[in-house]
Image: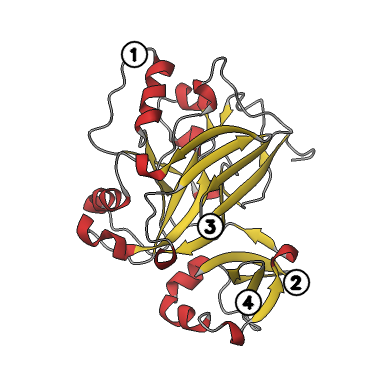
Amino acid sequence: MKLATILYNKIQCVARIENDAAYIQSEPKFKDVLEFLDNQEKAILDFSDLATLQKIDKKTLNFLAPIPRPRSNVMCLGLNYLEHVQENTKIMGREIPPPEFPIVFTKAPSAVNSPFGEIELDTSITQKLDWEVELGVIIGKGGKRINAENAMQHVFGYTVLNDITARDLQRQHKQFFIGKSLDGACPMGPIVVTRDELPDPHNLRITSRVNGETQQDSNTRHMIFNIPQIIEILSRSRTLEVGDVIATGTPSGVGVAQEPARFLEAGDLLESEIESIGILSNKIISPKSGV
């Protein structure tokens, strides 16, 4: 299935997406994909027969993040593409070896933004707002000490996200959380593609564009740590829960690595795309007056 969280006639609910159409329950039972996951055996059955659902033109919908407010921080991997490790060697001016173990940090739930939402850039807070397109993994079955051999059974599906980063805050605070957790700094969506419909998540083209100009262009096969390895390592010390979101790292092409460095400005349009999943399209705006 392809699932989304939408607003339709002022009602927030889950929709099944098929081509140019969306299908919803006439009396929606699930307000978002997280509630769907909490009741997934029944929910999957409810959405399995399109004839029992109300058909809507997809163009009339307002898409929200599939999980608008995760229960836990979004778990993220740093330096999980070799080419991104190599460009960090250039950024830092010293040799950066590929990580022996995953570099893990988190983004606050309040950072999550809709797939077509505006991203506010307050230059009094950051002047170095950067992009990082990533494949998002949605956990559908919780667990602890999950073996890599069984890890994919715990995956519900996949989405697109962008790990928007304030590079100056990241450097100032000597850690990632503040620079990664600006409000709206994690656009996500537009849909979740379930695992059965995307059998090989390790062979997907992944790209980002700013004002139509390609910045990142790679493939998920270049991950250093693949999804089963990531799940095994994350679950060693922490119980993974239904609805957890894992961002699997970004390829090369981030703004801070360019010569000269390039950062997002008000008026820019940031697009993030992963093959077979979809495209995020987020306008960068100045702070709204009165806020």
Q: Residue furthest bottom?
A: 52
Residue 84, x across and y down, in percent? 40, 29
Write the residue at 42% across / 61% down. 198
Gap in angstroms between the C-alphas marked 2 and 4: 12 Å
Q: Secondary structure at mark 3?
A: loop
**Disc 1 to disc 3: CB gap under 8 Å:** no
Label located before the other in sequence (1 or 3): 3
> Dot 2, how many residues are within 10 Å of its Cα: few (below 14), some (14-19), or many (20+)?
few
Give the labeled residue for mark 3.
Answer: 69
Instruction: Tell me the crowding category of disc 1: few under 14, some 14 to 19, or many 20 or more residues within 10 angstroms, Cα based.
Output: few
Q: Which of disc 3 and disc 4 is earlier in sequence?
A: 4
Residue that mark 1 sits on? 94
Marks 1 and 3, how far apart at CA:
38 Å
Q: Residues within 10 Å of mark 4 (few under 14, many from 20)?
A: many
Residue 37 spot, x, y in % from top left: 45, 70
Q: Which quadrant holds the C terminus?
A: top right
Mark 2 or mark 1, earlier in chain: 2
Q: Is residue 145 visible?
A: no
Secondary structure category for the residue under label 1: loop
| Real-space Cα separation, disc 4 to disc 3, in angstroms | 21 Å
Residue type indicated by callout 4: Ile
Q: Amino acid at mark 1?
A: Arg
Residue marked by disc 2: 9
Given this view, does label 4 or label 3 mark the residue nearer the observer?
4
Q: Residue shown at 41%/16% (left/top)?
A: 90
Q: Secondary structure at mark 4?
A: strand
- Closest to the observer, 7 or 268: 268
* Residue type of the residue flagged with mark 2: Asn
> Which residue is denoted by mark 4 in the rendering?
24
- Residue 44 location in percent, x, y? 46, 78
Q: Which mark is first along the chain, 4 or 2?
A: 2
Whether the residues at callouts 1 and 4 have beta carbons within 8 Å, the answer is: no
